Image: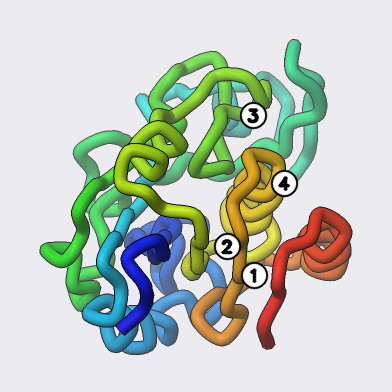
Amino acid sequence: MHDANEALIVIDVQNDFCPGGALAVEGGDKIVPLINEMLPDFHVKVFTQDWHPAAHSSFASSHDGKEPYQTTEMPYGTQVLWPDHCIQGSIGAKFHDNLHRDRADLIIRKGFRPEIDSYSAFFENDQTTPTGLEGYLRTRGVEKLTLVGLATDFCVAYSAVDGRRLGFDITVLEEACRGIDLDGSLDAARRAMRDAGVHVVA
């Protein structure tokens, strides 16, 4: 059992990020048994859930002439445009059926503001609008976080870097993550995490 000041953060293990989903990450479903095994070992367990309204600004379908995985400029910077995914209330937005979601102490929903995307568990992509996760962890006395989930190079990496910026001790267990690897994004994410002081464990 981990110490009381440690939390497990399970990032976006949802149907649309698993094989057959709208934004499938290869092998995304393979991490579910690993995460289920880890859950009883942590006093604090938080799940995040991508939760987009239809016609979200991060969807390629919301931009004339744009295709998925192209980019556009938003007020907060460059935004990758994604296939429509994790639409509120849809099957794709649900947690994977085999994930022990009843173990979660808290579920943080992110990306619900139509005009801004949210990769990180801590902040929207403007890097200033908080999700509320930091405050929850502080009140629970948490200082160390272990991150698992989907996808390594986007939501997991952004969460890890933000967590370090906020002063948490962060470990990313790559065995229980899977990446998209869009134009070298996986190696770039690993470098960014290590540069921020994240413990990246293969």
Instruction: Tell me the CA gap for discs 3 and 2.
Output: 16 Å
Does label 3 or label 1 sit earlier along the sequence? Answer: 3
Instruction: Tell me the CA gap for discs 1 and 2.
Output: 5 Å
| Pick the front one: 169 or 151 | 169
In the rendered structure, the answer to whether residue 116 lies left or right of residue 103 reads: right
Instruction: Tell me the CA gap for discs 3 and 4.
Output: 17 Å
Position of residue 74 measured from the top left corner of the image (x, y, whole percent): 74, 17
Q: Residues within 10 Å of mark 4 (few under 14, many from 20)?
A: some
Which numbered tag is attached to residue 33?
A: none
Residue at (37, 49) in percent of width and height: 141
Q: Do the residues bearing badges 1 and 2 touch, measured as CB atoms within 8 Å?
A: yes
Q: Secondary structure at mark 3?
A: loop
Position of residue 164 measured from the top left corner of the image (x, y, whole percent): 68, 49
**Residue indicated by mark 3:** 125
Residue at (11, 63) in percent of width and height: 102
Q: Quadrant of residue 116?
A: top right
Does label 4 or label 1 sit earlier along the sequence? Answer: 4
Q: Tell me the amino acid under the disc marked 3.
A: Asn
Which numbered tag is attached to residue 69?
A: 4
**Residue indicated by mark 2:** 151
Q: Quadrant of residue 78?
A: top right
